[in-house]
Image: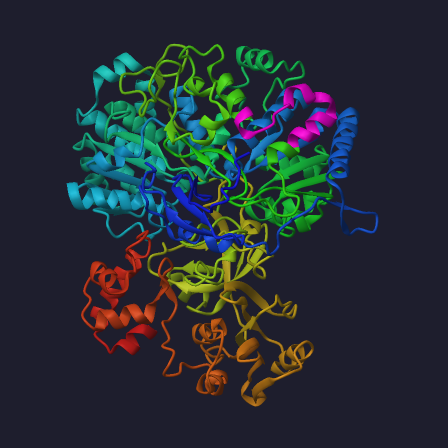
Amino acid sequence: MTAIDPDLRAISTTCAYCGVGCGILATPDGRGGAAISGDPDHPANFGRLCSKGSALGETLGLANRLLYPMIRCRKGTMERVAWSDALDHVAHRFQHIIARDGPGSVAFYLSGQLLTEDYYVANKLMKGFIGSANVDTNSRLCMASSVAGHRRAFGADTVPGCYEDLDEADLLVLVGSNAAWCHPVLYQRMLVNKQKRGARIIVIDPRRTDTVGEDDLFLGLKPGTDTALFSGLLVYLADSGVLDRDYIELHTTGFDSAVARARNIAGSVGATALATGLSEQDVATFFQMFANTPRVVTLYSQGVNQSAQGTDKVNAILNCHLATGRIGLPGASPFSLTGQPNAMGGREVGGLANQLAAHMGFTPPDIDRVRRFWKAPRIATHEGLKAVQMFEAIARGEIRALWVMGTNPAVSLPNADGVREALKKLELFVISENVISNDTVDAGAHVLLPAQAWGEKSGTVTNSERRISRQRAFLNPPGEAKPDWWIMGEVARRLGFGAAFSFTSAADIFREHAALSAFENAGARDFDIGALQSLSDSDFDAMAPVQWPIRQGTEPQARFFAEGGFFANDFRARFIAPEIPALRTETSAARPLRLNTGRIRDQWHTMTRTGESPRLGQHLPEPFVEVHPDDAARYGVADGDFARVTTDYGQCTLRVIVSERQQRGMLFAPIHWSEANATGARVGSLVAPVTDPFSGQPENKATPASITPYEYVFRGFALSRKPLELPAHAWVARVAVNGGHGYLFADNADVAGWQSWLKSFVRNDLAEYKDFGGGVYRAASFDGDRIDTCLFIGPAHDAGDWNVVKSLFAADTLDHDQRRMLLSGKSTDGLANAGPIVCACFGVGRNTICEAIAAGARSAADIGAKLKAGTNCGSCIPELKRLVARTEANAVPPKLAAAN
């Protein structure tokens, strides 16, 4: 394992978040933290970081860390035990259950946050030696449809292009991808291409996201109609003579049947418009732009993948690139944007239940090859259960033991309430984690194993363009935290498989992984990093980012398929004839809307890491649902109020944002909030467990839903140096703040009860303002010259200014005037209210921005020059532009503009 540099010099590593795979320079501060900056030499980002990556240094604290192994004792409580006892217990219970019920009764559920070496050991242990393929990963929720589409078309899960294509394309088509928020470093790269080379951008999405703004065309199609749009495009290409007939003839098969099916789905511009809900003019414009632009990159992400028709959507896109030969060429390829830092690395080692390692599958030759390489006579011989199926099998009692590593399925899976109940039925429930509490841990874990976190562990990850990068340790692991691969290796040894798991370092595992990729390959399989199988430990530690394949005696390969060479037996690509698109669920009088779910700009997954950063909690601090104004009026919900969103699987209570950027008939709610950080906001509990028949990926974008207003008489907030347990009757959202803990809440209980709650634990130096008749109560306790705890509650718009009081709370000392004015909840002369934060990278608030606009800033560039907002990751630039447009349109004084 990589040693910590005692001189505290910058360590080159890779970001913990999305699949862009940005290089990071982390400089430890010697106190458990680190200064974070972008690595200017890393080819994924050239020094640029997004808001989340920039704030990684704020997420390294040990609050809520799992530091020691723990086992649930007979009294029902979790108690600390020695590593040897925990490992013995896990191995013994797995052994007992397998002997009684067979290898199919146990399962692993993994994470795209794991390093490739962790993933490799997990798959080798379960598939090779336990003999079950019940190993799946949260990447099933993210990229499985792209995997299935690639394999159907190319014969392998191969991403044909690379990031340089984003610089060289003349047309960039973003499908179901809010890249401005979810992949901002790559999105900024696209904007540079637009500004310098004149590249055009098309955005295809039911929502008008922040990616829409720099586009030349926005296609707000109906949900689930992507296949119809690209089927119509294929017909148009065929009828317009834009096909590459030589490429089709030499390198593909199935073209005629694919075009015939496309004609049946959307045989003309008019038919495509009717199927997608778009105007004929917009459809015709898109078709013409695509047809007339040889250098085109089509980028697709969760809006395509997270669908019960996701694989067909992917193949409809791939068909258009194959038909024109626009694949594997500079500036011309389909490109899947990966959602997690190592979803690609997991795919390389067989992280999904329908894969074997090194991009091999469950065919007899591949099974035999991996069996001989691993010397694994018990190797699994058929596919395992995919994620949603796996948890349904747990609910039925067919899987009795589950080991979850680095993920939170009780929040992230569809029908999350059902998942939580299923977990309680397990005979053995093991979790490898770095937090002591989250929704999944709290669902009844029997064993908790402390895993190393980002900054402590060492190994490799692979990004969206097939680039392998090193994640290096720069912090000493706290407590008794261990690498995931070590934990699994110790259990394997106790199960009797020690000879096959004698790894002593991540480098050991990587060398075996590389050797397997080249084993009996000779170019037959896409994934081959055989040239790295003999790396020394020092070479592994120093390994620079490199794209695969890296075959023995050859240079790394940036692109695939420009001259054919696909990975089917006949070396040809397959055109796929998709099914006629139709959503698998139907709306009704009781569920008249469709719920779309997704991410927001500054948060990640279930906020285990990003939720620790005060900077990242400022932009959108509360769980919300976005509604079109017409739907808001129809169903009686108002902007800023609360609403209850209900589906056949659960319900959530969320803040309402009314926005014309949302499509009529659709709701949007972000996925990040859990029971650990909000009340009644686990959006996964709303999602239908409907899956794609090929990929097994769930449909997260179109669950039938209803919305009704939910009234809270009082709103408020609390701030404290220590964590608080707010009254159970309140709706609460927890927010990281500088200096302590923040809570935004709403309630219908008597205000006097809040006074009693506060006084139950705060007794000294308490200042109060009470107007119980008016429903107002404000109080603050002090520790010397700084606020220790404060509570503000009042009618909906009279609770005090959260941003002002939060700034005062962060101060080490308050002067006399600030202390005197505190309970007014208003700004003093010495503390301007910057308003809600728009630019997370530099902490620039909306009021400050609007004042700059009123003072003469007329563009995002002007604002950046004055305030730095938008000059780092650029993900706030669309909002800056909207503020400029709104302020100019209103032409009102800056104070009023800021309040709008």
Left or right: 841 in relation to 760: left
What is the magenta segment's predominant secondary structure?
helix
On the image, the x and y values in percent for residue 195 come to: 18, 46
On the image, the x and y values in percent for residue 837 come to: 38, 65
On the image, the x and y values in percent for residue 51 come to: 39, 53
Left or right: 672 in relation to 156: right
Asked if one can make out residue 705 in the rendered structure from this viewpoint, the answer is no
Q: Is 797 colored magenta in this rendering?
A: no
Considering only vertical position in the picture, is 69 above or below 831? above
Q: Is 507 colored magenta in this rendering?
A: yes
Q: Residue at x 23, y 77 (%)?
A: 892
Where, quadrant-wise, is the N terminus in this rendering? top right
Q: How many marks?
A: 0
Specify start and end residues of the magenta stretch as a single range: 488-508
Considering only vertical position in the picture, is 370 above or below 803? above
Asked if one can make out residue 94 in the rendered structure from this viewpoint, the answer is yes
Residue 313: name its quadrant.
Answer: top left
Residue 720: name its quadrant.
Answer: bottom right
On the image, the x and y values in percent for residue 896 come to: 30, 77
513 or 742, which lies in front?
513
Q: Residue at x 45, y 44 (%)?
A: 17
Left or right: 483 in relation to 330: right
